[in-house]
Image (cartoon, rainbow, N blue to C red):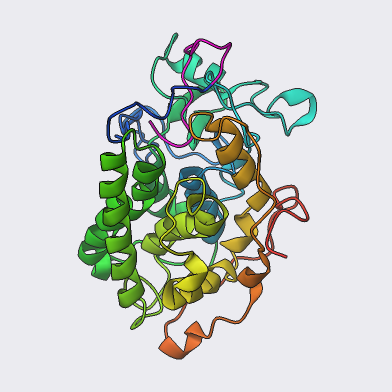
């Protein structure tokens, strides 16, 4: 079950999420069975690449969805794929569009993302997750396979990239990047969830040790190079960033990943600030929505629903000095321009 999963199941208290995340006595196991339909240039799955036809539904609170928002912005796909943003909280049924006028997505006209899944498969019984791409004409979800979505943005949607779009999947580094991405996903991206949703002390202890072994590996790796793979920003950096930017705000306390804070790891902290201050990264991050999502939705581990006021976020904008390691953030490309009007993070919700 992903961070942003909600099923059409009554958990015994209306549509509470209680019991949806933690199973007593067991290790947390992520459900990775997503809708694998792809949007491709040749349309082999019935959904050809077509500007204006599809809508990306991506809650800013969710790290998996945050990836797609970043990649869409870095590649300049705003004109080709519209963006819908559910609010930060959901019940056991679905994400809802409570940030939009009248609580409905202005393009799809739906109140719950669940409606798009049901139009694809009536009674869809798996997780209603973000990110999801919806076919606007039919109103049905096409896919919620988050790692494939961003890779397809780089490859299948190339005809709609902005001039100067970076190569996020550089062919010369793909073998190394696949290996790095695998370790980052299993040990870091998903590792924090294994800690937070552990159902026993033993499961938590094992998850904690695995997480910090990997964090120390990254701290060492990033002491010698500015980016994870090669000398430019790649999708590997996007995938790691969305976990790091949530670490001190959520994972350190809420998920008990508390050996130390990100701010106490000089190389990882400098790396995270470097990316945060790069156009396309920090300008997609809404810390208030992130905290609201985790602390309110995860009733299993925070039954009071109290959202902490901290931590201090001003450090994200301080000097990082990572330029001394060299590297070319966008390679032969250029940074994206200003955030599209109407897609800005709510004032006061970012670093300040």
Q: Nearer the viewer, residue 49 or 97?
A: 97
Whether residue 267 sits left or right of residue 286 in the image: it is left
Picture coordinates of residue 177 (x, y %)?
27, 63
What residue occupies the far front of the structure in this picture? 201
Q: Residue at x 35, y 26 (%)?
A: 23
Q: Residue at x 52, y 33 (%)?
A: 298
Magenta residues span 1-16
Q: Residue at x 43, y 71 (%)?
A: 268
Q: Nearer the viewer, residue 165 or 298?
A: 298
Quadrant housing the C terminus: bottom right
Whether residue 229 sits left or right of residue 128 in the image: it is left
Q: Is residue 168 above or below residue 14?
A: below
Instruction: Say if residue 343 shows up in the picture.
Output: yes
Does the magenta run of residues contain 4? yes
Whether residue 223 sits left or right of residue 164 in the image: it is left
Quadrant housing the N terminus: top left
Instruction: Say if residue 164 shows up in the picture.
Output: no
Whether residue 256 sits left or right of residue 223 in the image: it is right
Picture coordinates of residue 207 (x, y %)?
29, 48
Does the magenta run of residues contain 35? no
Picture coordinates of residue 64 (x, y %)?
46, 45
Give the main secondary structure, helix, strand or loop, of the magenta stretch: loop
Q: Is residue 2 above or below residue 180?
A: above
Q: Nearer the viewer, residue 23 or 100?
A: 23
Picture coordinates of residue 337 (x, y %)?
65, 66
- The quadrant holding residue 14 is top right
């Amino acid at each position: 079950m992903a961070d942003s999963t909600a099923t059409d199941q009554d958990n015994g208290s209306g549509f509470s999420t209680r019991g949806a995340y933690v199973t007593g006595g067991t290790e947390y196991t992520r459900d990775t069975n997503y809708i694998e339909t792809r949007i491709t240039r040749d349309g082999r799955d019935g959904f050809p690449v077509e500007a204006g036809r599809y809508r990306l539904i991506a809650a800013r609170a969710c790290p998996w969805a945050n990836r797609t928002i970043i990649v869409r912005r870095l590649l300049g796909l705003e004109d080709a794929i519209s963006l819908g943003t559910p609010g930060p909280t959901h019940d056991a049924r679905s994400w809802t569009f409570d940030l939009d006028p009248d609580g409905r997505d202005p393009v799809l006209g739906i109140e719950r993302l669940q409606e798009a899944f049901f139009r694809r498969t009536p009674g869809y019984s798996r997780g209603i997750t973000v990110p999801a791409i919806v076919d606007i004409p039919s109103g049905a979800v096409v896919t919620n396979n988050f790692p494939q979505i961003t890779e397809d943005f780089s490859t299948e949607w190339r005809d709609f990239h902005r001039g100067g779009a970076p190569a996020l999947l550089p062919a010369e580094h793909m073998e190394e990047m696949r290996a790095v991405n695998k370790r980052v996903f299993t040990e870091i991206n998903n590792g924090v969830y294994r800690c937070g949703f552990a159902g026993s002390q033993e499961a938590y202890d094992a998850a904690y040790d695995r997480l910090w072994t990997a964090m120390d590996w990254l701290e060492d790796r990033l002491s010698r190079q500015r980016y994870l793979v090669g000398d430019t920003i790649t999708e590997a950096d996007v995938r790691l960033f969305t976990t790091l930017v949530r670490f001190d705000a959520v994972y350190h306390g809420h998920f008990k990943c508390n050996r130390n804070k990100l701010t106490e790891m000089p190389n990882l902290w400098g790396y995270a600030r470097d990316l945060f201050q790069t156009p396309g990264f920090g300008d997609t991050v809404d810390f208030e929505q992130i905290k609201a999502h985790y602390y309110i939705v995860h009733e299993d581990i925070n039954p009071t629903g109290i959202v902490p006021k901290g931590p201090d976020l001003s450090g994200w904008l301080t000097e990082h000095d990572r330029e001394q390691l060299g590297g070319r953030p966008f390679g032969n490309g250029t940074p994206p321009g200003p955030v599209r009007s109407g897609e800005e993070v709510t004032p006061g919700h970012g670093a300040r």
